[in-house]
Amino acid sequence: MAEAGPEGEREIGHYQTATTGGIDYASVPWRLWEKSKRLFWNPADIDFSRDAADWREMTDGERALVAMSARGFMVGEEAVTLDIIPLLRCMSDLGRLEDTMYLAMFTMEEAKHTEMFRRWFDAVGLDPSSLDALAAEQQAARGRPGIFDGPLTAVMRRLDTDRSPQALLDASIIYNQFIEGVLAVAGYQRWDETFLRLGDKLPGLQAGLRLTQRDERRHIAYGTYLARRVLAENPGLWEWFEERWAKLTANLTGGYGADEGSTAQDGARQREARELAELYQRLSKRRLEALAVARTMRVAEVDASAIEAFEPEELQHVG
Ligand SMILES: [Fe+2]
Ligand SMILES: [Fe+2]
């Protein structure tokens, strides 16, 4: 657990695996690492051949709906792949070996999600850059920068120079609670509705999304573990967290899918946007509750919790 010196030099006895204690197999990040190894999958193994056939049969409207959702997820996965790095380096610098090892796996999983979506585009023969104009239009309609266009990067890069409990908590808030626990989970529920409407088409994409959610279940668990640990140790940060969360989630309307692309005359879309806003609010409340329990916990209790205690119930069906 020793930190590297200012020049990065390391002394005999620095390496945790070479000490008597060795690896903490009971730690939460280690248990998540074990689970990740058991549930390993390869995006290149997914068969997208029926997706390509289905794609040719779909209407333009169906194709636009699926393509824009897939694009949204794909760029989000690429953004989180790149932006997890400061947290990984932070844990490495703090000498937290189990966290570092799990975060290396976490990073690879985000990279696999990115690959999965791009392979799908390639399989159906759609160049995602053909969606640029539509994506720009949607962004302009939102009237504010998206979370992946600056805010996430800023919060994560803060960890390069600030390893305070508040900075770590903020990383979990933005990355794991907000993006993974609210935006993505709501997005998966929208995918379920889309596939239902399409009549069970695109089996490759459906399989890829299921595998992605299984990984995200552990990612949210890790972030929740991290946040609970910080809050158990620093209960004074709770008020700051509550304010931060309220501000972050206040303007959540149908940012993904429902309020995109269409106009006020479309009543069905308005209803969808309302339903999505309600879903966002429900999920936001769930994440708030998931962290609130830490206010009365000791750090040792957080460390001793089963990993299921950190996993969001909304993703428990994916295994
Ligand atoms: Fe992901
Ligand atoms: Fe993730």
Image (cartoon, grey):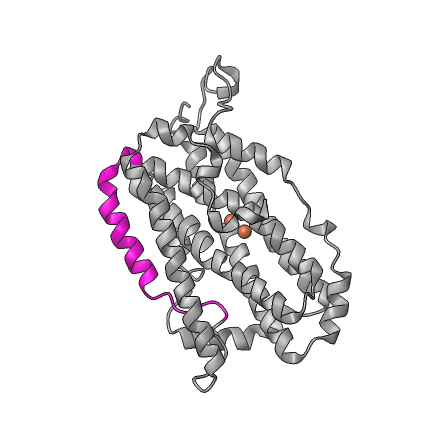
Judge by depth and name the residue closer to the eye, 315 or 101: 315
Looking at the image, residue 283 lies above or below residue 219: below
- The residue range painted magenta reads 232-257
Point out the residue furthest to the top here: 20
Q: Is residue 153 visible?
A: yes
| Quadrant of residue 299 within the rendered picture | top left
Asked which quadrant contains residue 65, the reply is bottom right
Looking at the image, which residue sits at the far bottom? 265
Q: Residue at x 68, y 50 (%)?
A: 43
Q: Is residue 292 magenta?
A: no
Above/below status of 240 relative to 188: above
Residue 96 % position (x, y): 44, 29
Above/below status of 31 relative to 107:
above
Q: Horizontal and vertical percent for residue 8?
A: 43, 28
Dominant secondary structure of the residues highlighted in magenta in the image: helix
Q: Is residue 110 in view from this perspective? A: no
Q: Position of residue 279 (x, y in %)?
A: 42, 62
In the image, residue 187 sits, relative to residue 67, either above or below, namely: above
Q: Which image quarter is the C terminus in?
A: top right
Q: How many marks?
A: 0
Out of 91 and 314, give the one closest to the viewer. Answer: 314
Residue 116, given in percent of the width and then of the height, sits at: 65, 55
Q: Residue at x 74, y 60 (%)?
A: 48
Q: Which quadrant of the figure contains the N terminus? A: top left
Q: Nearer the viewer, residue 280 or 63?
A: 280
